[in-house]
Amino acid sequence: MIRQAAILCGGLETRHGAVAEEKPKPLPEVGGAPFLDTLLFELGRYGVRRVLLLAGHAAQQITDYAVSTPMKALFGLEIDVSRSSRNAPARAGQFGTPANGWMMCSLC
């Protein structure tokens, strides 16, 4: 079973227009909550307990939100933030290999 996930969320939002003018990609609201919470909810309900957010652009905003998201308490998530999305697969490698039970998601 997959218990760990890495989420690429450090892009410059060049394709998201006005939706992402003030917030980084994972934080605009969708259905009344930040999109990141939707991802964390889905990962949590399927048993993922450790999440690495690979945040380059606007890393401080992502870090601040990761500390306070209600999904941490709901699922007992451990959320780490890497402040650079450069060489993301290698950074995600701190989880081990995909065969060791981790997955990578991308916010396009």
Image: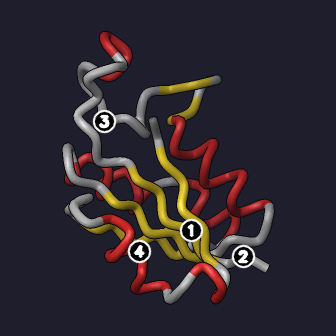
Picture colour scheme = secondary structure
Horizontal side of residue 34 vs 48, given as left or right: left
Residue 93: which quarter of the image? bottom left
Q: Which residue position is annotated with label 2?
A: 2
Answer whether labels 2 and 1 touch (C-beta < 8 Å): yes
- Label 4 packing within 10 angstroms: few (<14), some (14-19), many (20+): many
Residue 73: which quarter of the image? bottom right
Q: Which residue position is annotated with label 4?
A: 92
**Furthest residue to the top?**
18
* Cα distance between the residues tagged 2 and 3: 27 Å
Q: Residue at x 50, y 26 (%)?
A: 29
Sequence-first disc among 4 and 1: 1
Total number of numbered labels? 4
Which of these two is toward me, 69 or 107? 107
Element at label 1? strand
Horizontal side of residue 108 vs 5, given as left or right: left
Residue 2 position in % (x across, y down): 72, 76
Residue type at mark 3: give it: Pro
Q: Which residue position is annotated with label 1?
A: 5
Answer whether labels 2 and 3 touch (C-beta < 8 Å): no
Answer whether labels 4 and 3 touch (C-beta < 8 Å): no
Horizontal side of residue 75 vs 4, given as left or right: right
**Residue 56 sits above or below residue 38 on the image:** below
**Residue 8 sits above or below residue 88 on the image:** above
Element at label 2? loop
Residue type at mark 2: give it: Ile
Answer whether labels 1 and 3 touch (C-beta < 8 Å): no
Q: Residue at x 54, y 62 (%)?
A: 104
* Cα distance between the residues tagged 2 and 1: 8 Å
